[in-house]
Amino acid sequence: MRPGFSLVIVLLGLHPAVERQAGSSRILEEILLVEDRRAQGENDLSILTGALAHADPLVVRHAARAIGRLERPGVAWHLFPLLLSPFPAVRSTAMEAIAQAAQGFRGDSSRDSRGATWPALHACVHVWEWISHGLPSDPHILISTGIGVIVVSFLSFALAWMLARQEGVV
């Protein structure tokens, strides 16, 4: 067998990957354009949320990061399913994007409401874990997480929200 023949076989085998890569690069370009426009229209947001289901983890990560950079807490819920991704990089990017999306709560001058947001997001992660994987089998973990994390954080968030409304911040 001639060495040139095996090189041709290898190069032909790479051809479909190049097409796939071209498709991903088009979607990545769309994501950048939408992010640059700050996703002003509903169509822009649907491009980002649609890219979250893409087969290429790089596309998913860029879409998640773009959603986070919008700093709109109302769209952060699209990112929670990514916390169950088999790819650690996707899970990490999703968590960062959720935290960045929560920055949208910082539009006020009240430190109380900002400080209460993070524990509430932490509680949401636990609730999502329970929905996905079921309740913990150890009753001590169930009680400590249920009361110590979820109930207390949502109560503190509700109290901060009421105080912010009294101050006229929200």
Image (cartoon, helix red, strand yellow):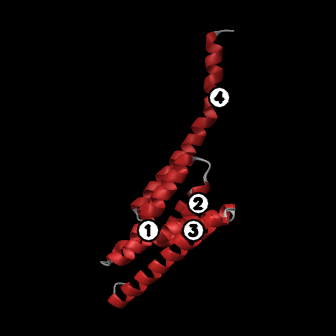
Task: Residue at 50% x, 52% y: name it.
Answer: 92
Name the residue tied to disc 3: 144
Answer with mark 2 or mark 1, whichever residue precedes in sequence. Answer: 2
In this rendering, the answer to whether 109 lies above or below 141 is below
* Disc 3 secondary structure class: helix
Answer with mark 4 or mark 3, whichever residue precedes in sequence. Answer: 4
Q: For the residue carrying disc 3, how many other residues have a C-alpha within 10 Å: few (<14), some (14-19), or many (20+)?
A: few
Q: Nearer the viewer, mark 4 or mark 3?
A: 3
Q: Quadrant of residue 80?
A: bottom right
* Disc 1 secondary structure class: helix
- The picture places residue 124, in percent across and down from the top left corner, at 55, 69
Label 4 to label 3, Cα distance in Å?
Answer: 54 Å
In this rendering, the answer to whether 157 lies above or below 57 is below
Name the residue tied to disc 2: 50
Answer with mark 4 or mark 1, whichever residue precedes in sequence. Answer: 4
Label 2 to label 3, Cα distance in Å?
Answer: 37 Å
Answer with mark 1 or mark 3, whichever residue precedes in sequence. Answer: 1
Label 2 to label 4, Cα distance in Å?
Answer: 29 Å
| Viewer-side residue, 119 vs 61 | 119
Q: Quadrant of residue 164?
A: bottom left
The answer to whether the residue labelled 1 contacts the one labelled 3, judged by CB atoms less than 8 Å apart, is no
